[in-house]
């Protein structure tokens, strides 16, 4: 029972990963590509935190509840791993900063080319280069 | 209709594969030795950071240089965004002309005032006790970024600028935050330590409250930097599109 | 007792899968932003059940607040419907 529920979680997260990569590659609209990129990076972060979890009971977050040495022994026996959580906080903030830069670039592409379809941008750019405007 | 059929096929495939591999998987029950070292040493050990919150002490003390470079990446992304939407002096003056008249009905405006005041208090509280409970600089800064968004939506952006928070002031606040982080990272060099050293140098307790050494200073300055960076980005994004088309000379 | 945690974890992961599939195959971009917000809430529940409270605070503010606002700003300045 426990192994079945754990494997349902892992397989559905892997399926979300595959769907979002298909979404980045196959959809020609730039805003849809940005939405699929955010889903992809969020799922990768969940998979990293899943590596640090312990399937025991009772399980506690990695925060020392009382400042005494007797609490320390029980704390080490029941707390989850703190290192993946620190790495994921860093990854979430960096991903968000890069997505803001991509959003500004999308708005600027729309102002210059007039369309959000990457196939149209690919057709317009060689014309502009040949005419010497871009 | 085609989408729903695709969704059903996807769900049945996922459940089938999960049944098939469930026999070979054992869920983990033990800690890695490095995680155990951090859990033991964070408050009571011999390499301690005097903070009962293990994740914040990993972020700013044991792996502090990672977070310093992450702050640098965030800074570069904000600079890149501000450069793409650059305006010269007359265009910036013209982008600030407008009427600060709220355009939504009266109950929405009143509730927005209350919510913005509560967001300011709650986000400062999250950022300042990051060394005792879950929280810290990044969490408080992201929560603070929602407040100018609500003000731009309910009142217009001109109300925010006429009360003194324009793009230049937001960039000044962000620079103060980044300068604070740099100074706190370089201070241990004066006492013959190394860069971003925490424990023998900064005080571990004040008036009976565990301070975590330099963690509380790092959290405060990161809070200011992240919140002000987002405010500058939203102030640039909310300039209406008609004005930008006139500035760029777009023909369409 | 641990089966309750793991059941809610599995249900939240399945809701995330459904919401992200609907977000990627939707032609009206405002509805895609709404489905993406549902997926972010499901992932916030997963982070809470994996005992990571710091990540929940940062992730809820970023994914439900800032990403949705950013995407609505972009859609307001460009087009609303996707052309396939």
Image (cartoon, rainbow, N blue to C red):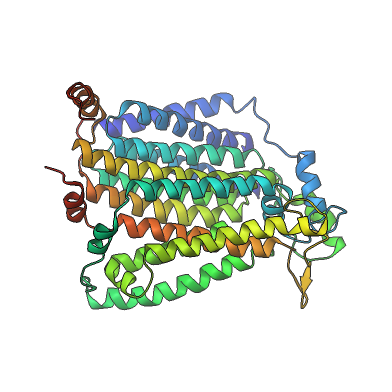
- Viewer-proximal residue, B24 or B212? B212
Residue B143 in view here: no
**Residue at point 30%, 36% (across, down):** A30
Q: For residue B200, which quarter of the picture?
A: bottom right
Task: Give coordinates of residue B192: x percent, y percent.
Answer: 83, 55
One can see residue A47 in this view: yes
Q: Is residue A115 left or right of residue B232?
A: left
On screen, residue B241 versus residue B80, left or right, reads: left
Quarter of the image that includes the C terminus of chain C: top left
Judge left or right: residue A134 versus residue B23: left
Q: Nearer the viewer, residue B142 or B173?
A: B173
Percent x, y of residue B168: 40, 63
How many numbered marks does the figure carry? Answer: 0
Residue closest to the far left: B252
Residue B86 locus on image (x, y percent): 32, 51
C8 or C82, which is in the foreground? C82
Q: Is residue B25 above or below residue C1?
A: above
Quadrant of residue A103 in the image? top left
On screen, B92 above or below A3?
Answer: below
Query: B182 or B233, which lies in front?
Result: B182
What's the residue at 61%, 68% (across, down)? B128
Residue shown at the point (36%, 40%) measured from the top left: A35
Spot occupied by residue C79 in the image (x, y as percentages of width and height): 20, 43
């Amino acid at each position: 029972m426990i192994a079945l529920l754990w494997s349902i979680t892992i397989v559905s997260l892997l399926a979300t990963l595959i769907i979002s990569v298909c979404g980045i590659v196959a959809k020609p609209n730039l805003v849809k590509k940005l939405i699929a990129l955010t889903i992809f990076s969020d799922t990768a972060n969940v998979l990293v935190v899943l590596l640090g979890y312990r399937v025991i009971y009772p399980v506690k977050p990695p925060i020392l509840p009382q400042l005494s040495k007797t609490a320390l022994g029980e704390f080490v026996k029941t707390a989850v791993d703190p290192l993946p959580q620190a790495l994921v906080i860093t990854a979430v903030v960096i991903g968000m900063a890069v997505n803001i830069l991509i959003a500004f670039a999308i708005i600027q592409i729309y102002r210059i080319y007039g369309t959000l379809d990457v196939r149209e941008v690919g057709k317009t750019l060689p014309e502009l280069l040949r005419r010497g405007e871009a | 209709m085609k989408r729903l059929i695709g969704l059903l096929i996807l769900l049945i495939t996922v459940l089938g594969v999960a049944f098939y591999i469930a026999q070979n998987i054992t869920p983990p029950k033990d800690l890695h030795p490095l995680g155990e070292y951090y859990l033991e040493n964070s408050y009571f050990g011999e390499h301690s950071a005097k903070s009962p919150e293990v994740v914040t002490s990993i972020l700013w003390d044991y792996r502090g240089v990672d977070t310093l470079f992450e702050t640098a990446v965030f800074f570069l992304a904000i600079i890149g965004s501000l450069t793409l939407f650059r305006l010269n002096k007359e265009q910036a003056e013209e982008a600030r002309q407008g009427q600060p008249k709220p355009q939504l009905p009266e109950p929405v405006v009143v509730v927005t005032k209350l919510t913005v005041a509560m967001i300011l208090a709650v986000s400062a509280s999250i950022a300042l006790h990051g060394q005792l409970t879950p929280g810290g600089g990044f969490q408080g800064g992201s929560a603070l970024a929602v407040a100018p968004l609500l003000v731009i939506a309910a009142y217009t952006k001109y109300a925010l600028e006429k009360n003194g928070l324009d793009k230049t002031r937001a960039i000044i606040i962000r620079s103060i935050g980044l300068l604070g982080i740099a100074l706190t990272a370089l201070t241990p060099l004066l006492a013959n330590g190394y860069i971003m050293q925490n424990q023998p140098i900064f005080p571990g307790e004040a008036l009976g409250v565990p301070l975590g050494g330099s963690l509380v200073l790092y959290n405060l300055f990161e809070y200011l930097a992240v919140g002000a960076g987002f405010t500058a980005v939203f102030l640039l994004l909310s300039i209406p599109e008609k004005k930008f088309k006139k500035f760029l000379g777009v023909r369409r | 007792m641990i089966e309750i945690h793991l059941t809610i974890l599995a249900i939240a992961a399945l809701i995330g899968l459904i919401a992200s599939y609907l977000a990627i195959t939707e032609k009206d971009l405002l509805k895609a932003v709404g489905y993406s917000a549902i997926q972010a809430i499901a992932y916030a529940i997963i982070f809470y059940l994996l005992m990571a409270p710091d990540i929940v605070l940062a992730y809820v503010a970023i994914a439900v607040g800032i990403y949705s606002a950013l995407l609505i700003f972009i859609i307001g300045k460009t087009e609303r419907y996707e052309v396939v």
